[in-house]
Each structure stands twice: as C-alpha cells, then as structure tokens.
Amino acid sequence: MRKIFALLMICSLILMTGCGGGGEEKKAAEDAGKIKLGMITRLNASEENFGEFMKKVEGTLDVKISSHTPVFFDNLNAMQMALQSKQIDEISTYRSVARYMIAKDPRYQVLKDHSLEFVDSFCFALRDDETELKDSLNKVIKEMTSDGTLDRLTKEYITDINTEGEPPVIDMPHFDSADTIKVAVTGDLPPLDYVSADGKPAGFNTAVLAEIGNRTLKNIELVTIDSGARAAALTSKQVDVVFWAIVPVSEIIPADTDKPSGIILTDPYYRDKITHIIFKESEKK
C-alpha cells in the first residue's frame, strides 16, 4: 500500500512540475490573463513565434497587443465555433469578412477599440521555380488594375455584395489543349475567398480567376482545401497557385514575414484592413 501511495505521489509531482522544469506552467500562467485571439493558420508562422512577433511590434510602436495570445485554426468554421463556445475571445479577420459575417449574423460585432490595426496586401503564392507563371500573373494583375477590372470586381463581389443570398458561382472558361493552372481556394474569407455549402468556389475569387483564365488563355482548375493546408498543397505540387497569401503593408513588418522558403509571391490584387470581431450571445438575429 505504501508503494502504491509513493507512486501516486511521484506521478502527482511529475504532473505539477512538468518535464521542462516549470516552463510550460510559467507560460500557461502568463497566457491565463490574455485575450485569446483566433486567427486562420499562417503559411509560415506558429502560434508561438507569431506571439513573439506581436511582442516585438508592441515594443516598436508602444502599443498594447501582446495582451492577446494567438490561437490558430485551419478553417473559419472551427474558429467561429470556438468563438461562440467562448474557447476564444476574439477573431482577427478582415474588414470585408467582418462586414459579411455581421450581415449574416448580427451577433458578431466589430471590436472598435482593439489596440492596433494593420492593412494586408493579398497576393498569389507560387513555388519559386514558377517564375514564368508569376510573370504571367503579374502582367494580368497590372492590366486588371490599370483598366479598372479589379476595382469593378471588388465593388461587385465585396463592397456591394447582396448578403441576403450567396455569392454567385462563376464558370471557369475552358480552352481546348491549353495548359491548366490548379489554384487552391479555401472559403475561409467570405466573400473574398468563398466556397458554397455544396462545395463550389464562388464570388470574388472565382470572378478574379475567371478573368485571369480569359486573359492568359489558360484553364483554371479550382481545388478546395483548408487554409492550414495551403503551404503543404503548394510545395507538394497538389496545386500550382494559392489564391491568397498576405504581405503586411507596414514599414516595421518584413514583407516576407509569412512567406515559407521556396515560395514566391505575385504583385498584390487586393488590400484590406485587419479588424477584430466578438460574439454577443445576448443579441438576437
């Protein structure tokens, strides 16, 4: 009986002290009072090093953002469920996404007083050996910017979108004997990157990619994946292009902060401001 008691005591000590000499407990204690901030998994950052990045930004700009601890999610649905069940306190997303989510469910609210806002540029991500494809995409992005096509598509599918229905599915053009570009879309940034309930990509992403297909005379094949699988899908050649990758629009944040090794980025095709949203359960739809 004494042996059993001694073993139980040893097990209790191990659980209390941990293998790292109390490091994990110290970190848990530090995180306990922080705001849990849900974020879509980054291409090239972990929760830990993104948290360290937030501390550096705080030191540089004298703002309070390290009061948040990042919690990564591989898709928007899981992050929304975590917010509604209070596993996290806020979601970090984009102004256009927040506007769409609130229109669909007024219990989501923009948190107007969070400490710092950034603007991100959205680019296509490719493998670094696809320089010819990158040049082709940059050429089309420049044309679509100059002739107002990107502004028109942004207005039609993001700014003035009718939230009473769902973003429209757009057929991709097809060219016999033409090359096919496989493009990963996630559906995790509605209405910017949207996938309908029946699994069909729709809205802004399909409109932009259809225009690119028409201008490059190449077939576009849309491949739906979780956001957390974007980098792996690209480097494993499951896809040729990731529909969205981000570059912060800020002098204090390196442009390649979230760019994995072996990946190159096109010029931007869209910009949006980061915002935080909360979920108010007491509010009724």
Image: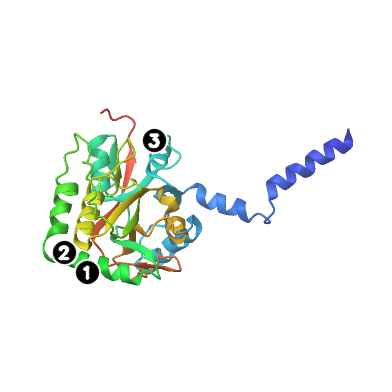
Residue type beneath disc 2: Thr
Is residue 27 at least partly visible in the picture? yes
Q: Is residue 208 left or right of residue 38?
A: left
Where does label 3 land, which residue?
84
| 1 on left or right of 23 | right
Q: Nearer the viewer, residue 229 or 24?
A: 229
Q: Residue 141, located in which quarter of the rendered image?
A: bottom left
Dot 3 alpha-carbon crowd within 10 angstroms: few under 14, some 14 to 19, many 20 or more: some
Q: State which tag comes first along the sequence, 1 or 2.
A: 1
Q: Relative to 74, say whether 196 is above or below.
A: above
Q: Tell me which corner region of the image, top left, top right, bottom left or bottom right, holds residue 263.
A: bottom left
Residue 179 locus on image (x, y percent): 31, 60
Tag 3 secondary structure: helix
Residue drawn at (18%, 47%), measured in percent from left and top?
157
In the rendered image, which residue does mark 2 sit on? 145
The front one of 239 and 229 is: 239
Q: Earlier in the sequence, mark 2 or mark 3?
A: 3
